[in-house]
Image (spheres, rainbow, N blue to C red):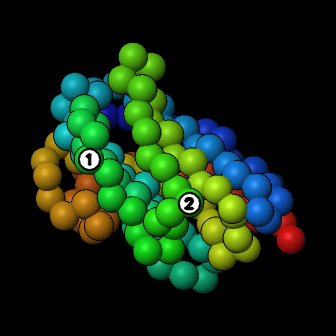
Amino acid sequence: QVQLEEFGGGVVQAGSSVRLSCKVSEGGYTMYQVGWFRQAPGKEREFVAAGTWRGQNTYYSDSVRGRCTFTRDLAKSTGYLQINNLKPDDTAVYYCAAQQDSYDWRLESSYDWWGQGTQVTISA
C-alpha cells in the first residue's frame, strides 16, 4: 500500500512561484509513475504533470508547460512540482497520485493511489 501526502500549498501572489511536495511514506518501491492533478472550484479534476518515478521522463499539460517542472528526490522519497509565473487560473487543490503500471498518465483512472490534496490559492 502506497501512502502519499502533499505539502506546500497556501496563498501565493500572481506571478510568483510555488513548489509542492509529494511525500511517499510507504510502498514507494511499487510505484512506476507519479502524476499531479488539480481541481479548481466548480471544475473537474485535470491533469497537470506526470513522470516515471525512477526515470527522467516527464509530461506536462498545455496549461502549465513551459512554467512547470516535475522532479523527484528518491533519497527523500519525495516528488516536487514547481509552477512559475502563477496565474489566478492556477488556483486549485493539487493532488499527487501514483500507479504501479504505465497506463495513460493523463487519466485519473490510471492511478492506484492518491494523496489528500493541498490547496493553492493565487492572489492578484
The residue most toward the front is 66
Rendering coords of residue 79 (x, y %): 44, 36
Compare residues 40 and 87 and report the one nearer the observer. Answer: 87
Q: Is residue 43 above or below residue 68?
A: below
Secondary structure found at label 1: loop
- Give the crowd class for mark 1: few <14, some 14-19, many >=20 residues within 10 Å: few
Q: Residue at x 59, y 55 (%)?
A: 83
Q: Residue at x 39, y 62 (%)?
A: 60
Q: Amino acid at mark 1?
A: Asn
- Give the crowd class for mark 2: few <14, some 14-19, many >=20 residues within 10 Å: few
Q: In terms of image quadrants, where is residue 16? A: bottom right
Image position of 94 (left or right of 35): right
Query: According to the image, label 2 marks what residue?
Result: 67
Q: CA distance from mark 1 to mark 2?
A: 17 Å
User: In the rendered image, which quarter contains the N terminus?
Assistant: top left
Q: Residue at x 50, y 74 (%)?
A: 63
Compare residues 117 and 36 and report the one nearer the observer. Answer: 36
Is any part of residue 35 visible from this angle? yes
User: In the rendered image, which quarter contains the C terminus?
Assistant: bottom right
The residue most toward the bottom is 42
Q: Which mark is residue 57?
A: 1
Q: Amino acid at mark 2?
A: Arg
Q: Is residue 118 above or below residue 75?
A: below
The residue most toward the top is 75
Rendering coords of residue 50 (x, y %): 34, 54
Image position of 53 (left or right of 39): left
Rendering coords of residue 117 (x, y %): 55, 52
Secondary structure found at label 2: loop
Is any part of residue 119 visible from this angle? no
Q: Residue at x 29, y 67 (%)?
A: 106
